[in-house]
Image: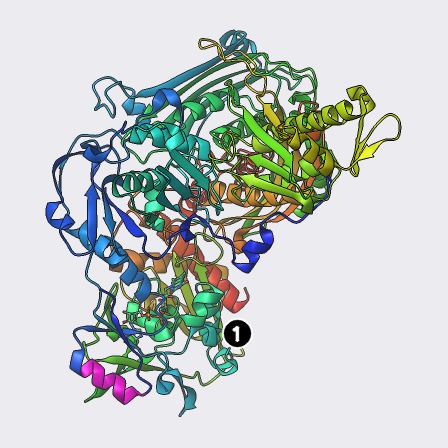
């Protein structure tokens, strides 16, 4: 069962078009909800007049911030809830929601939107995160424009750099990126038995419940959130979107309501990948060992906090990459601006950091004249290494194995990569490590498990399945534990009434954390069953053996599981195993960033071949080999699926994706890779076996994406002979580079290329 | 709010409708531009056309035939047909090559050449090869019909000289008297389903001596309206293909763009791109 390839639960329904996603929840008779958004930012609302619009035929009610009974501030991180659901009088960034229309039909709703009178007074804003932190600039929020700052200090980086024979300093920058899941935000809310019930696509139903409760000023028990099937998230569906509006309208109207964002709204109304500006200095000794890094990170959170805090911290912690660096000085700041707000996106700042630390590794390899792969192998973390935060990694450090596996392919591809007059070609490597789960905070998961009367194993989990495959992996673990076929496992999932919190489907954490919680529940259930049998046969617990056919006692007694369950139930005992897992982590020291922020780390390295068209400037990625240490692959097919998806997303991040509000906020202008842009991918699964993971597993959801852009950027840099320091490497940027370097000698050696 | 929908089966009926309600009806062929436009207008709260006149099923508009040394191409011929029709592939391969790079499989099944011209985008992938080939367009209304050069019908970016009661009926392309070599290339931000950042259609006749006897070159997203690159063609006639000649052509194309389109921020990209695209296009066409 572990390491096999069962077909993903729900795949058949998806292929047949039977799946009901969030956007499919609406039913006849539901009211339609539509939002009026403001497009001038920053601005102050001078006048908002909706009475006439509210009297139009088919319009039921128009809500504004004044209708919010609780606290009009949401945000996933408890200390930085700063985002109004409906504008509090200020428009801090483009697209902010101002009024919510409930109408009998979509058409009537649209008419109402057009009839609401909104007058805005433009205000001075700040759009550059650097400028935002200077004195005397407009404040996005009263508390000031610095959202968060995290330092990581280990040893004496300045002194070590001064002593280093090789030093390299480069400034890297990245653009805001949209997730672009197939399904936009959508859902439905109803009023049932005196409570509000919201069904929507989401990555985190239990968080949704708590923030909705705050918003409506209700106890959480009066709100039920059910996760509908979810057509992709990638971080975009971690913050609340339609849920707030659905709950608010259902609360007031006591009627079922439905809401679906348009694609444009989906672009505007959700957080983007943070643009980071990274000033990176590295030092190396004569033997090619990293001596120190000094890194300055500045992130643009846009107008709201969302996950800014977490991204700021995670970027700082991962700044060195998967290498041993004795002296580290990282200063990471996250600033508010009036730009589009940024939120979680696959990797929480690490994809941006990996672009920088991997650019440095390639640059250092050139500086010192070593092969980039060898240089990485000589510096990478191993069992027993200490990370930048002072954490000692005891085991399961698979980066060396990833690099070695890649090495064979690297040498095989090298002779084939030749430039010609039109196409410049190169190979590049990207490596990364990634802490599984949230950074330096408790982030538990819980699960329950029981046998039904017919002998099915029922797993209760709050873990949102968003396409990544947590349903399948959790069911596989449960089936494996009890030695049952997967078909006999049934999941009850993502429903605040029937399941307990598993935390978010984010940070690559569900396989590892919820997997452990499920195993904990399985052990608990086994104990309960054994206790029942021991009482019956009057023997010790450890004399009972669980077999897939039932329980066996010391004197050859046996009883099927269903019977013991029935017996216990008759005695009034609850035959439900309870499980919980909270990864053992320590809080980072606020001054120095030292601590053990994660209980497990995933490692990966990828190799990309790149072809730059000198006519158009288009960067094409024909091939990627991706080596991923996942601890243990619970489902190999699912791991390969994650790798394929991550690599393609990484190609988009590297070569074409850039969100510009008002310009690239739809799929016509915002380009994501198509199948024609997808490389041929060779997935390589490395299993280092993490003893703390369920059956040795770690995570792969975000790691699959993280090394791609660095590998592509390094390959393009070799092809072009110049270090590419900004993502995306758009046609314009590449053309500029080509024009500048046309007549000069390449700065970068390209052994494999020309 | 929803437009009414008419789908006449004859040209006469369609023209009658247009004549009566020309101001309020919008012609719909594949709808791949029009539906996008209507949706955008809806979202912005702008007015949408009260009626749509679907001309895609009118047999006359779907015709492809040879006629006195000309290829006749109905306005409602789809890009899928342009891509695969054996006659078109043989007689105007540059148009087939362009069609193959247009949109996606799904879009090509719907999108028509008439719609491409109706939209009159400077980046239209059908317009560039038609321009290179000096296509003439037949425009009809209930009471009259006129034939004019395609370049005269398109009056500005996104603008045509069609009257409210007029319909694009067909295109007519003269066959070359002798075999010609051709080339179409498109610069996109990704490798499929993207509007051209720039496109180029080239058709050249080489005589036995290897000399260039005739050349037709047009580029899209370079000028506000489609236009042949006569400046470049002039350099080529009577010459032997060669690197230096082609590089001079590339530079000349850029000069022409500067003169006609003026200087804008996008030129920082477009100038080197056009220069290289022209050089590469000529090299590939002539096999240099
Ligand atoms: C996903 C996608 C990708 C695309 N990719 C490309 C691409 O790569 N290259 C490209 O050039 N375009 C592309 N387009 C744009 C569009 O598909 C083309 O312009 C197409 O040729 C339009 O044809 P249609 O038949 O769909 O026109 P419609 O949308 O039906 O009509 C377009 C316009 O022409 C008018 N019109 C149509 N037929 C006539 C007629 N017979 N007489 C008078 N007026 C008429 C209409 O009133 C309307 O104004 C793309 C569109 C989409 C949605």
Label 1 Cα neighbours within 10 Å, binned few <14 / some 14-19 / many ≥20:
few
Q: Is residue A53 left or right of residue A356?
A: left
Outermost residue toward the right? Answer: A555
Q: Residue at x 74, y 26 (%)?
A: A530
Q: Residue at x 29, y 20 (%)?
A: A133
Q: Position of residue A149 (x, y in %)?
A: 39, 17
Q: Quadrant of the N terminus of chain A?
A: top right
Q: Secondary structure at mark 1?
A: loop
Nearer to me, A349 or A729: A349
Determine the quadrant in which ligand 1 lies: bottom left
Q: Which residue is mark 1?
A: B210
Q: Position of residue A367 (x, y in %)?
A: 58, 25
Above or below: residue A88 compared with residue B133: above
Q: Position of residue B9 (x, y in %)?
A: 33, 86
Read off the magenta span: B10-19
Above or below: residue A292 compared with residue B73: above
Outermost residue toward the front? Answer: A570
């Amino acid at each position: 069962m572990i390491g096999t390839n069962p077909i993903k639960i729900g795949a058949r329904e998806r292929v047949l078009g039977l799946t009901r996603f969030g956007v499919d929840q609406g039913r006849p008779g539901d009211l339609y909800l539509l939002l009026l958004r403001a497009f001038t930012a920053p601005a102050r609302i001078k006048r908002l007049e909706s009475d006439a619009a509210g009297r139009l035929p088919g319009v039921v009610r128009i809500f504004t911030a004044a209708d919010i009974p609780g606290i009009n501030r949401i945000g996933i991180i408890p200390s930085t809830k700063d985002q109004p659901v409906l504008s509090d009088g200020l428009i801090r960034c483009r697209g902010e929601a101002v009024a919510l229309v409930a109408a009998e039909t979509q058409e009537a709703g649209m008419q109402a939107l057009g009839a609401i009178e909104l007058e805005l007074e433009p205000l001075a804003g700040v759009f550059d995160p650097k400028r935002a932190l200077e004195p005397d600039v407009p404040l996005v929020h009263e508390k000031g424009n610095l959202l968060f700052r995290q330092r990581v200090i280990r040893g004496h980086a300045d002194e070590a750099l001064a002593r280093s024979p090789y030093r390299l300093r480069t400034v890297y920058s990245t653009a805001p990126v949209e997730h672009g899941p197939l399904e936009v935000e959508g859902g439905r809310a109803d009023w049932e038995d005196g409570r509000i019930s919201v069904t929507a696509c989401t990555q985190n139903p239990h968080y949704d419940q708590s923030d909705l409760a705050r918003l409506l000023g209700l106890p959480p028990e009066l709100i039920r959130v059910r996760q509908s099937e979810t057509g992709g998230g990638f971080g975009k569906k971690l913050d609340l979107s339609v849920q707030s509006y659905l709950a608010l309208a259902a609360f007031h109207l006591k009627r079922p309501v439905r809401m679906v964002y348009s694609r444009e709204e989906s672009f505007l109304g959700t957080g983007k990948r943070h643009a980071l500006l990274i000033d990176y200095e590295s030092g190396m000794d004569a033997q090619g060992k990293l001596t120190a890094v000094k890194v300055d990170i500045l992130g643009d959170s846009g107008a709201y906090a969302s996950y800014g805090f977490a991204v700021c911290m995670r970027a700082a912690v991962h700044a060195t990459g998967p290498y041993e660096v004795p002296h580290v000085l990282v200063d990471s700041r996250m600033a508010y601006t009036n730009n589009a707000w940024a939120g979680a996106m696959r990797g929480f700042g690490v994809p941006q950091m990996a672009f920088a630390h991997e650019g440095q590794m390639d640059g250092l390899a050139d500086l010192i004249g070593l092969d980039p792969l060898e240089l990485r192998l000589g510096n990478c973390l191993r069992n027993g290494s200490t990370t930048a935060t002072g954490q000692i990694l005891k085991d399961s450090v698979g980066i060396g194995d990833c690099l070695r596996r890649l090495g064979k392919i690297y040498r095989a591809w090298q002779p084939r990569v030749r430039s010609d007059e039109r196409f410049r070609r190169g190979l590049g490597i990207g490596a990364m490590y990634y802490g599984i789960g949230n950074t330096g905070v408790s982030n538990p998961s819980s699960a329950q498990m029981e046998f039904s009367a017919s002998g099915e194993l029922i797993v209760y989990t709050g873990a949102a399945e968003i396409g990544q495959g947590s349903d399948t992996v959790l069911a596989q673990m449960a089936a494996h534990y009890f030695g049952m076929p997967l078909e006999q496992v049934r999941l009850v999932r993502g429903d605040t009434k029937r399941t307990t919190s598993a935390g978010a489907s984010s940070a690559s954490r569900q396989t590892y954390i919820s997997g452990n919680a499920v195993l904990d529940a399985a052990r608990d259930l086994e104990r309960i069953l054994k206790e029942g049998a021991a009482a019956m046969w009057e023997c010790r617990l450890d004399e009972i053996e669980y077999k897939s056919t039932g329980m066996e006692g010391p004197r050859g007694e046996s009883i099927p599981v269903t019977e013991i369950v029935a017996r216990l139930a008759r005695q009034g005992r609850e035959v439900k195993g309870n499980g919980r897992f909270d990864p053992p982590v320590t809080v980072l020291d606020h001054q120095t960033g030292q601590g053990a922020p994660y209980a497990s780390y995933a490692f990966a390295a990828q190799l990309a071949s790149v072809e730059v068209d000198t006519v158009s400037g288009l960067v094409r990625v024909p091939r990627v080999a991706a080596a991923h240490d996942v601890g243990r692959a619970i489902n190999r097919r699912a791991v390969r699926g994650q790798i394929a998806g991550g690599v393609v997303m990484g190609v988009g991040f590297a070569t074409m994706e850039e969100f510009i509000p008002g310009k690239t906020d739809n799929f016509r202008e915002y380009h994501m890779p198509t199948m024609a842009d997808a490389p041929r991918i060779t997935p390589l699964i490395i299993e280092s076996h993490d003893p703390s993971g369920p059956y040795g597993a770690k995570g792969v959801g975000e790691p699959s994406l993280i090394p791609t852009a660095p590998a592509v950027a390094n390959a393009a840099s070799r092809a072009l002979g110049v270090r590419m320091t900004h993502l995306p490497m758009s046609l314009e940027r590449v053309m500029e580079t080509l024009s500048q370097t046309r007549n000069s000698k390449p700065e970068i050696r390209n052994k494999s290329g020309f | 709010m929803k437009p009414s929908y008419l789908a006449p089966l004859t040209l006469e009926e369609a023209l009658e409708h247009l004549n009566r309600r020309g101001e309020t009806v919008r012609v719909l062929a594949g709808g791949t531009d029009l539906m996008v436009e209507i949706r955008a207008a809806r979202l912005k709260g702008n007015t949408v056309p009260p009626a749509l006149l679907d001309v895609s099923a009118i047999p006359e508009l779907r015709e492809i035939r040879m006629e006195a040394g000309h290829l006749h191409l109905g306005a409602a011929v789809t890009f899928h047909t342009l891509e695969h029709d054996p006659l078109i592939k043989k007689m105007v391969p540059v148009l087939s090559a362009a069609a193959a790079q247009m949109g996606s499989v799904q879009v090509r099944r719907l999108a028509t050449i008439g719609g491409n011209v109706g939209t009159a985008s400077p980046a239209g992938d059908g317009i560039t090869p038609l321009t290179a080939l000096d296509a003439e367009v037949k425009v009809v209304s209930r009471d009259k019909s006129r034939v004019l050069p395609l370049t005269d019908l398109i009056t500005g970016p996104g603008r045509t000289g069609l009257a409210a009661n007029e319909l694009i009926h067909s295109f007519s392309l003269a066959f070359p008297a002798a075999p010609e070599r051709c080339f179409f290339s498109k610069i996109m931000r990704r490798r499929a389903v993207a509007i051209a950042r720039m496109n180029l259609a080239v058709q050249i006749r080489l005589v036995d001596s290897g000399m260039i006897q005739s050349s037709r070159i047009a580029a899209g997203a370079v000028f506000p309206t489609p236009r042949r690159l006569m400046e470049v063609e002039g350099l080529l006639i009577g010459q032997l293909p060669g690197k230096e000649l082609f590089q001079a052509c590339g530079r000349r194309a850029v000069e022409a763009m500067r003169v006609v389109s003026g200087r804008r921020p996008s030129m920082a990209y477009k100038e080197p791109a056009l220069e290289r695209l022209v050089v590469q296009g000529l090299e590939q066409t002539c096999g240099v």
